[in-house]
Image (cartoon, rainbow, N blue to C red):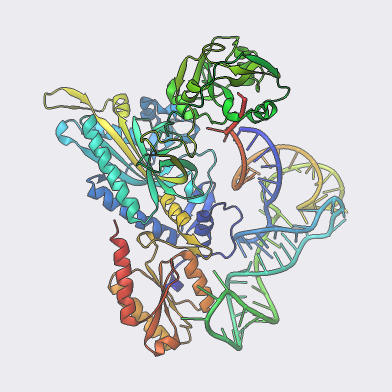
Amino acid sequence: MRYSRYFIPTVKETPSDAEVVSHQLMLRAGMIRKLAAGIYNYLPLGLRSIRKFENIVREEMNRAEAIEMLMPGVQPAELWQESGRWTFYGKELLRFKDRKDAEFCMGPTHEEVITDMVRREIKSYRQMPVNFYQIQTKFRDEIRPRFGLMRGREFIMKDAYSFDVDSSAADSSYDRMYQAYMRIFTRCGLNFRAVEADTGSIGGSSSHEFMVLAESGEDAIVSCNACSYAANVEKAESAQLPVGTETGLLQLQEIATPEMKTIADVAAFLGVATETTVKTLVYAHENGEIVMALVRGDHELNEIKLKNHLGWDDIQMASEEQIRSCTGSPIGFLGPCDLKQKIKVIADNVLKNMVNVVIGANQKDLHFTNANCGRDFTVDIFTDIRSVVAGDPCPRCADGKLEMWRGIEVGHVFKLGTKYSKALSATYLDPDGKEQVIFMGCYGIGIGRTVAAAIEQNHDENGIIFPIPIAPFHCSLVAINNTKDAVVMAASEDICKQLENVGIEVLFDDRDERPGVKFKDNDLIGIPLRLVVGSKSLAEGKVELKIRATGEVHTLSISDAVSMIQQLVKGALERD
RNA sequence: CGGUGAGUAGCGCAGCCUGGUAGCGCACCUGCCUUGGGAGCAGGGGGUCGCUGGUUCGAUUCCAGUCUCACCGACCA
């Protein structure tokens, strides 16, 4: 490909509205341009990277015997009403009406559509296992699109859906996809972790997320430093903490704490550690149901755990009025003692071992010290409702500690069970002629997001450093002063042909630009290998090969350079 | 959805307070010069100042409305 005939609108200045490096660099490198909030044009260079990644995904899906198809972007409301998600999915689902006033939505995911197809076509146990996938544009009307392709509203996604006769067969399909995902991200040369995850709005029984590690990641994940346990913080189970030195129960005391509304205020005011306090939170369901949740003062409540424990489809902090009506207290002095109204009290497991705690007294400017569960207040249920923190003991092994990372979620695999097949009556006949419900799994990969994550993980002050498997070109060929120097030009054209003949994708920089401009642009757009042809070294039959990632430079004969490039590319593409 | 801020040339910005219909840097075009890390000189093209309405002899500037965008927040008792 000749640079002069191609289209790579690079930009020197960093766009002011781009926060994260991948977004800045994709704009500067001329890979993407914004059309509207969270909606982008994929320019030629960006598209090449995306296609590269898509093809890796496609190869691994095919290898895992998933079957490619394509579903529509626009979906009828009826299917979503049938699955119950028309109301459940919320504002992220972009809804609209056609000319006949019939309701539709832009597909944010395709469980309904695929299940509908399968229930019409799959009738026998003989037709399973089967796994359909597509690579397609989805739309989710995000609250706050940001970070370029990382959290767009319109985005390209690979989604796959497996259909099996029973739960254990579904488990095998799930494992197969899990392994395929491991291969995909390994082939791309990414530093990633597979972690246990919450299932969110997709639903289902269990799931893993594939996280590319990066400081700018929107998710917090933990992994054990001793065993293989790794999980999203939303999901990570907390282990019981070691019990402190045993002391007897002390006398309950009421203490004035004027204007001390936060845990930090109260602990500082009383001169105690926040670990000896209990934080009281009140949550409400949309339908008005209210619960009280207790966690240790220095811990954070995990709303997802609480929501899942309660089996609620919605959770929010209770309003000031709701809180007053059940506790009689203003916010800041809440506690489980002397409740005005009987409400369910859920406490974190850690509280089981705590004695003589500081807690709100349900009266303005008043707290209790030496409060004890069972004597001074009652707890209905102890369970795991806190978020784990770095250094917590591992929930799976004896002596591991949890480490914290930030990650970008690039893939997610779910065991769906029969959630959608039941709702949409997707059934089959087993060998005995009995009707059974199909077991499903679904498996997503954010295509654009993975490319962005790769950039997030692979860049320097000069620009992007693409891993070879997803680089838009394998190698750039920079001809110095080519518009004036016919020898250099002829040699460059020849080298370009030689490289292309052995399957190397070459970006031949034949522009009428000064060398500095070419070097800067080629660094910025992140082509992994760069071959420079200049008159001086060419006179000695040499060219210069520079490795973008390491900066190492090799001065080689043309034939050596071609074979080295060939080897480097081959080596990178065969990694798995 | 709440808070804050911003919309002036393709991009980044100034001008606006103290109304008199626009300017800088980069990019772009032409020429000369230069050619191993975003050169220099000279000349040039490009803007209904987000949109609608109001005040005024006159509005990019003042006022009202509206749209768009960005950032922050929505783990706090």
Q: Position of residue A277 (x, y in %)?
A: 59, 25
Q: Is residue A409 above or below residue A115?
A: below
Is B75 placed left or right of A450 in the picture? Answer: right
Quadrant position of the C terminus of chain A in the picture: bottom left
Q: Which one is in front, A454 or A158?
A: A454
Count the marks: how many?
Answer: 0
Residue placed at 37% from the left, 59% from the top?
A: A470
Residue A186 vs A145, above or below: the answer is below
Residue shown at 28% from the left, 47% from the top: A180
Q: Position of residue A251 (x, y in %)?
A: 61, 13
Q: Is residue A369 left or right of residue A188?
A: right
User: Is residue A69 at least partly visible in the picture?
Assistant: no
Q: Residue at x 65, y 20 (%)?
A: A333
In the rendered image, the residue lying farthest to the bottom is: A539
Q: Of residues A383 and A54, which is closer to you in this image?
A: A383
For the N terminus of chain A, the quadrant is bottom left
Would you say A538 lies left or right of A422 here? right
Residue at left 34%, top 36%?
A: A414
Q: Position of residue A404 (x, y in %)?
A: 47, 43
Q: Position of residue A206 (x, y in %)?
A: 34, 32
Instruction: Please identify the residue farthest to the left as the structure is shown.
Output: A432
Residue A132 showing in the rendered view: yes
A15 vs A199: above or below: below
